[in-house]
Image (cartoon, rainbow, N blue to C red):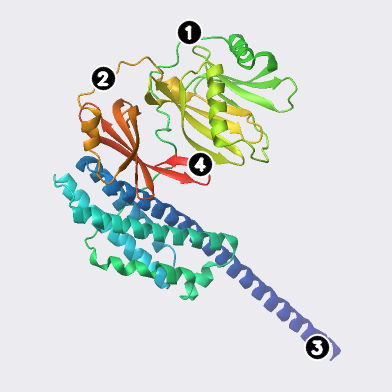
Amino acid sequence: MKNKRNLLLACITVLVVLTFATGYYAFKLREEYNNLNENNYTEAFSNLVNYVNSVENYLAKAMISKSPEHSAQTLTQIWRDSNLGMVYLSRIFSENEGLSQTAKFLNQVSDYSYSLSRKNINGEGLTEEDFNNLETMYKYSVDLENTLNQLSEEIYSGEINWKDLNLNSETKFAQTVDSINVFSNIDDNLNDYEGLIYDGAYSDHINKKEKLGLTGNDISEEEAKEKVKEFFGEDFESAQTNIVLETADIPGYDFSVKLKNKEEKYSIMISKKGGHVVETSLDREVTEEKISQEEANEIGKSYLADKGFENMKETYFIKQSNVVTINYAYNDNGIIIYPDLIKVRIALDNGEVLGIETSGYLNSHTERKYVEPKISLDEARNKLNPKLEILSENMAIIPTEWKTEINCYEFKGRVEDKEFLVYINVETGKEEDILVILDTPGGTLTV
């Protein structure tokens, strides 16, 4: 009898353990599933925010573009980006009215921008009503962008989570974006596309087959080491070869350099052809910001001149961890040559130059023959949208996606609170490009 009782107790114990284990396993599975959903929602939401930001910036461009060709490109980009935004929005499962209004708005922006791009492609110019509609859409896109950015901060800070958003239609987010239903009068339908990359004006280096700035004969590793010694001057102590880069876009020698009275080591790459400095880098922690942006601009310009890069003009910059990276373009008697670009990293605690990157300059720098303008500055100015308040104007050379260059008049201007750069071809009068200037907490960029 006692054995039966013990057996029964043992069975009950096993059942309790199994029940607990099964419950715990189910709990862990549910927890993993919830975490996976949270991650998927967060990734989709991050992409949604990026595409809404893109739509807002391209709508700003579309508001001032007068060229049918360039306007068609811009409007097509809006169509595609708003559709991609809807793709990522569809991955966020929610009954929330705010998100349905967001989908409605993106769909209508897509439809309307597509219909306007078709007008341009068919040779029809946009009417005043079209521009007014674009301006209205732009204003609401700014509201939507601000709302999404606010929601993003609340999600990443943990103030709200995806469960709250899916179950609670009374959130601030739902209430804020409900006003977007003003667009119910805009129609037409469409789909599909990809997005946008933020950076300074024409700062993507053109990797040309012929490196115009890469002059001179091939040099040996020892000769390259002498170039390193020459570059650092009397601060140089020793150099050690890290690697010989034979298959890089610019083949060269990479060295680790020890300087006098400095613990950290520099890395520097010297091109095999001609012994040019391709890039340098010093990694150290910068804990405070004492140097102003204006001072940093002058430090970088003076440093480049001292290293043999004369007549460089600062264009755009970005700050990160108390270090500013400034884009400098070659300035040839007032003509800004954007393809001849050098990036300089400067520590904002003491103004030390932490590195330079010259591949744009080495790809493109050469003595140019400038075309004689066939249209005057006044004629180019008349091709601008009359809403653009001109802040400055000069000559510039900009690169194209076909790895060629275009001589342009560059106009910097403002419409309401947005600043733009507009480029008019000096030979044809064609509107070649429009860039939106973004003044962000991290720097001045363009898109």
Which amino acid is tagged 1? Asn
Q: Are marks 2 and 4 in contact (CB under 8 Å)?
A: no
Depth check: give the residue in front, 359 or 150. 150
Q: Residue furthest right?
A: 2
Please tell me the numbered disc located at residue 443: 4
Disc 2 target residue: 371
User: For numbered disc 2, what is the local secondary structure?
Assistant: loop
User: For numbered disc 3, what is the local secondary structure?
Assistant: helix
Q: CA distance from mark 3 to mark 2?
A: 105 Å
Q: CA distance from mark 2 to mark 4?
A: 34 Å
Q: Are marks 3 and 4 in contact (CB under 8 Å)?
A: no
Badge 2 crowding class, 10 Å Cα cut-off, few under 14, some 14 to 19, many 20 or more, is few
Q: Earlier in the sequence, mark 3 or mark 2?
A: 3
Q: CA distance from mark 1 to mark 2?
A: 31 Å
Please tell me the numbered disc located at residue 4: 3
In which quadrant is the C terminus drawn? top left
Please tell me the numbered disc located at residue 217: 1
Q: CA distance from mark 3 to mark 1?
A: 96 Å
Quadrant for residue 446, please give it: top left
Please tell me the numbered disc located at residue 47: none
Q: Earlier in the sequence, mark 1 or mark 2?
A: 1
Q: Are marks 3 and 2 in contact (CB under 8 Å)?
A: no
Q: Nearer the viewer, mark 4 or mark 1?
A: 4
Which amino acid is tagged 4? Gly
Is residue 369 depicted above or below 96 in this figure? above
